[in-house]
Image: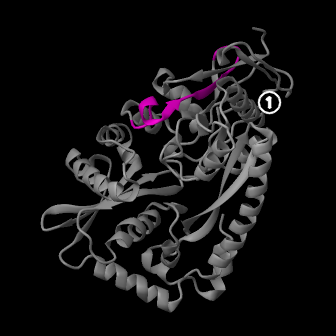
Amino acid sequence: MSDDTFSLRVESDITALPAAAWDACAAPSTSTIRLESTSNALKYRVDETLDDVQVVSEDDSVQPESRSFNPFVSHAFLSALEESGSASASTGWLPQHLVLEDPSGAVIGVCPAYLKSHSQGEYVFDHGWAEAFERAGGRYYPKLQVSVPFTPATGPRLLVAPGADEETVRAALAGGLVTLARMRKVSSVHATFLTEPDAQALADEGFLPRTDQQFHWHNRGYGDFEEFLGDLASRKRKQIRRERREAVENGITIHPLTGTDITEEAWDAFFDFYMETGSRKWGRPYLNRQFYSLIGERMADRVLLVMAKRAGRWIAGAINFIGSDTLYGRHWGAVEHHPFLHFEVCYHQAIDFAITRGLATVEAGAQGEHKLARGYMPVTTRSAHYIADPQFRAAVANYLERERRYVAEAGEELSELGPFRHTLRAEAADEP
């Protein structure tokens, strides 16, 4: 291998890669990595396995950029999914993580990817695509999925080490995904809940752009929850105060837990909530009990568990993950159902916590226009899709063009229905 050649390989077990190497790309520090190279051109040489895909690249003058911490692309979170068996070959999520190394063997880029035999647990729906392609005689599965399993949260997917040329590494990883798709003979590659730079890098590689909508809360420098309520229209302000008051009637108490306050007893109770609610909503919950113990061991300080108790026992709870500037709401469950308890545990408590911690955003997960009345405004999410078959690609491209127009129009209409006072509504809708 020449001094200016970089290697791209697939890793089927994230634990085989040192956590420090993965996390340097997922959440780079301010340290610098120097690359022995001299141009920005990319070139691939493909042999029988992806272990022999080579990327030739140069120029190492780019200085590192500090980035916010996203808990879902951390080694701790992804390894917990794999080690617990929640994301594994047996559940239809076979890890195929891309790892880009420089001539010295240093990891300069990674990409979480999975070979999938179904479309469950993704939150960007392509079941209709699969049915149409198979009716036409094609084979849609397996497909390649670039995402965090079971997690509809925007974050980086083409992860770049500090000091590496971000544009060059993203391009190498994007090209590597196409190469891997051809070698595995899959129908398609789907990269979901993307940041703008990742979406652009994938578009440059021929991926089709797709948009959707979520509801996020934005902190406008509030000192407390009451100050946030002051920005709402009077009727909405009264509604939320009533919800919060009635949610804790019948002797219910709310307990935000993080770090060492999250005991195995709390995890046991929360897992019962998750199984009860997940079984009703999805038929088969995705995560197992071991997963929660593993994240409790490895990243409890990045977890906010909001639990409700009545008559001495836990009755409901919601799990959130704490980023450097964002609180990510995930799932909730309950064994007793009380008016407005869902809104309190999932949405109002999340806002309270974000204000206290000085976090800029609360992402409340997928779907749910009911979040709008609680101060969560519509935000566009992005995904990108590589379709191998030319005719099928043309049909999907046509569909996505129409869908993007619909999403944009729906977002504008929903923004007009937000709970903020009229003078603040347009400004709130423009939040990133």
Residue 124 x/y as whole percent: 58, 53
Q: Image quarter for residue 9? A: top right
Residue at the far left: name it.
312
In the rendered view, does 68 fall on the left or right side of 90? right
Question: Position of 374 compared to 264: left or right?
Answer: right
Instruction: Looking at the picture, tell me which residue is in the foreground, 143 or 113.
Output: 143
Q: State the image coordinates of residue 116 (x, y, percent, origin top left).
A: 54, 36
Give yes or no for residue 73 being in the magenta stretch. no
Instruction: Between residue 141 and residue 350, name the one nearer to us.
Output: 141
- Is residue 235 at least partly visible in the picture? yes
Nearer the observer, 341 or 399: 399
Q: Residues within 10 Å of mark 1 (few under 14, many from 20)?
A: some
What are the residue bounds of the magenta stretch? Answer: 86-105
Residue 429 % position (x, y): 65, 73
What residue appears at the point 50 percent right and 44 percent down from the top-left corner? 72
Looking at the image, which is closer to me, 63 or 46?
46
In the picture of the structure, the residue carrying the numbered disc 1 is 61
Query: Relative to 376, does residue 299 appear above or below in the rendering?
Result: above
Quarter holding the N terminus is: top right
| Residue 194 seen in the current view | no
Which amino acid, mark 1?
Ser
